[in-house]
Every structure is written in structure tokens, then in C-alpha cells.
Amino acid sequence: MTPTHHCRRFRPLPLSRRGLLQQASCGFGGIAAAALLHRDAARAASGVVDTLHHPARATSVIFLYMDGGVSQVDSFDPKPRLAQDAGKDPHSLFKVDATQFNNVGTVLPSPWQFKPYGKSGIPVSDLFPHIGGVVDELAVIRSMTSEFPEHTNANYFLHTGSGLQGRPSMGAWTTYGLGSENDELPGYMVLNGGLIPPGGLDNFTNGFLPATYQGSVVKPNAVGLANVRPREKSPAQQQAKLDLARRLDERFARRLAGGGRPPDALESAIANQELAYRMQTEVPELLDLAGETATTKRAYGLESRYEPTRIFGTECLLARRMVERGVRFVELTCPKVGGDRWDQHNNLKDGHENNARAVDQPIAALIRDLRQRGLLDSTLVVWSGEFGRTPFAQGSNGRDHNPQAFSLWLAGGGVKGGTVVGTTDDYGYRVVEKKFMIHDLHATMLHLLGLDHERLTYRFSGRDMRLTDVHGHVIRDALA
């Protein structure tokens, strides 16, 4: 047989490295494709939607939760009329609804001055000079409302779209819809600054969604969470334990399945154990801030003399590191400031100033850092409490709960910065223009993530459930 008719069933010379790569490249691609298809099949089996309903403007969310209820008339909704009518009986000026404690005092003007910031000229209270410096990135919504005047139910409503305990949180719905971009980290992480809100961990629950979508609570320190570093003497010993646990779980799952699909609780437990194993590599590096520059740490307030600023600054810096690594939804809770959370039924001035001092500088640094790194366009930042406060005093120097009007703001992916949406009355007590409720906030967040809130559903208890229930409209005025 002449060389031109060679059967090519043997190779007379060894392959060069370049030749091997040329010949085997499809094989490598096949291996990679098999791994991706296996992962996608597993995600499909778990029920994750994983299909955008429309082009997304954001790929992740950072939720800055201001636990307790920030006063709108002392933060982002200035009301000069309060100073004009200071000391008057509010019953003589407008209809006063029942409050949480019904200790209604006189009209109470804001102890802080407001001034315009940025090119947009949006007025911001002296409580937030640093956030004022980034106000052109914000869409301030002054006309939000809640259905609940009490912390626990209002927290459930803010987090889950329902005042009832046990419903899936917005972080769980987000990861159910989109999954995580990092298989070594949970898609939904909660940074515990020291104050778990009223209602407890059910604010971060998966509810009736598969348990793999619950929030993973992490402390903003070098350890973060228990057992994140292996205790075994060698990786082989730990792997042997993991293999044994997997075999036992799979055997138990087959027995329970009876030829069908194993219970979600068991499948989720297996998936969570495997994720926990992978987290032992990823989480210590995530929480290690040694690689951050001194300038960055200083900007976030990590060198502040005020410990709550250092704590919340660490949370904000870790939130940026999380979205860099593909975490889909990050929530930050407030640190302890020696008094109450943003819930000043008395001593409004000291309480709000202490809380603002803790969060103002870190939040502004987060916005600037995300912008500088090119992450703000793909990260939706949301700042909100569960309701607002009354424009009249509780007693002499506090403010009671007010679910009828409060302010929040959005920044980042798809948001129209330098914008104010909605209007309250002259006292900041009730909404008079463009009234929104929490369902509208949730619809807007999902919309910016590429999800239609009416189509993101999960079959439970005989009907298709969703985060917004049967409510919700996208807040179009806040969108770029």
C-alpha cells in the first residue's frame, strides 16, 4: 500500500503536543459540554426557571435592609411644613389614624437640615452626607406604602410579599428564577451585622420552594460561618466521610422514592452537603480582605473609630466581593449601635444619628466602588426599611410607625439615577401621587433581573404561587 493510501490505523511517530491538542480538542470540548449539560440537567430537575423572560438589566441584587423603619421626613422627603406647624396638635391639621402605641404628640419638625446634592439637586438630610454625594446614582421613591404597621408582619411583607410567616423570600425567588453563577457559593447570602430582624430567619426562608434556595447567613468576619474550614486531618479523610454520607443518602433516597422522585427535603439536604464541601475552598478566600487595598478599606470605613461603621463597612465590602464572584442576591442587616435599630419611638435624634453614622459612609463607598469596577450597571442596589415614621411625635421626641408613606431608593442596573418618584402630602404622612406598595418594588426588582413577576411561578397548594401574589406593577418611572 502506498503512503497516499495509508489506512492511518497506526502512527509511526509520536504525536507532538500541538498535534495532540489539534486531534483531541473536540474531546476536551465534549468533556466540558458534558459537565455543563449535567449541571443544567440537575438545575432543570430542581425546578429552577433559568430562562429570562426579557433582556436583563441587572444580574445580581444587593439589598441594604434598614431594620426598624427609617423616618422619611428625616432622610429623603423634606417637609418644611413641619417646621411651620411645629408644636401643633396634628388632629387639628389632618386625620390621624391609630398608631402602634397611640401616644400621639405634637407635630415634630426634622432635627436635621436638607440640602440639594449632585447635578440632580435631590435634597438629602444631613443624616446622610456621604449618600448625598452619590445621589445622582439613585432613584428615590417617596411614595412607598406597606400593609402592616407592626415590625414582624411588615418584615415578612417586605421580604416575602406576604405578611404571613413561612413564604419564600425575594432572595429565594431570585435564585429560583436565575440560579447562581458560582457553583461553589450559595446564590442567596445574608450578611448578619448583628441584628436579625423581628420575624427572625423566616425573613430569609425558601418557604415552599426547594430548600436549596434558602438564604445562607454569614457573619462579616474572617470565620463567617461554622465549620467552613475542615477539621479532618487530611483531605482524603474528609472525602471518605463525604463519599460515605453520599452513599447512605442515595440509598435512603432510593428507598423513599419507591421508583419515583425522592422527597425535595432529602434531595436538598444532599445538594446542600455537597455545596458546603465546595464552600470550604471558596468561602475563606471570599472573607479574606487581605488583598484589598488600604485605600479601599479606608473608603468603606474599616478604619473608623465607630465600631458599627467598621462592621457595616465590612458587610458592604463583602457584598461587593460576593457579586464579583457571581452570588445572585446579597442582603445586609444592620449592626448594633448601642440603642435600638431604626425604631426610634423616643430619642429620635440620637437613635437616627447613631444608625446613620454606621451605614452612611459604607453605602456611599459601595456605590462608588461598584461604579469604578464596572459592576454597578449589572448590580441592582436597594435601600429600604419595612415602613416609615409619623410626622408627629410619639410622646415628645420620638416617632411612631407609619405604613402609609415611606421612602426607599434604588441604584445600579437599569435604574434611572438622579430621579425622584412619587409625592407625599405636606406633612409626609400619606401618599398623594404615584402610590406604590411592596409588590410593586418586587415586580420592579424582578423586571430588572429579566424576570416577569407574573410568569415567575411555583405550583403549591393547588395553584401557581408568585412573589407578588396577584398584585404588582413595575415602577417604570424609576427605570433608565
Image: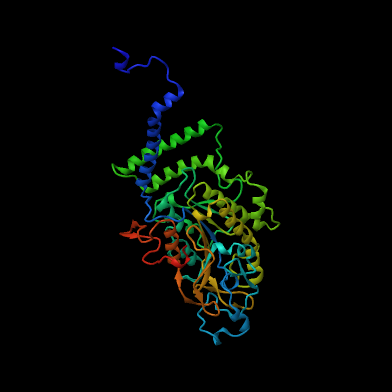
In the image, taking residue 232 as reference, residue 40 lies left or right, namely left
Between 169 and 249, the one nearer to me in the picture: 169
As rendered, which of 274 and 321 lies closer to the eye?
A: 321
Percent position of residue 301, x then y? 66, 55
Q: Nearer the viewer, residue 404 or 461?
A: 404
Q: Residue at x 52, y 32 (%)?
A: 235
Q: Quadrant of the N terminus?
A: top left
Please, is residue 408 above or below residue 291 in the view? Answer: below
Q: Position of residue 206 (x, y in %)?
A: 43, 54
Dividing the picture into quarters, in which one does residue 307 lie? bottom right
Instruction: Tell me if 211 is positioned left or right of 106 in this view.
Output: left
Residue that sits furthest to the bottom in the current view:
92
* Residue furthest out toward the right: 305
How far across and how far down the image is residue 278, in percent?
49, 40
Dividing the picture into quarters, in which one does residue 92 lie? bottom right
Rendered view: 3 above or below 36 = above
Residue 169 visible in this rendered orientation of the protein: no
Q: Is residue 19 visible?
A: yes
Rendering colour mode: rainbow
Depth check: give the residue in front, 341 or 199: 341
Numbered disc total:
0
How far from the left and from the top, in percent, is residue 456?
Answer: 37, 57
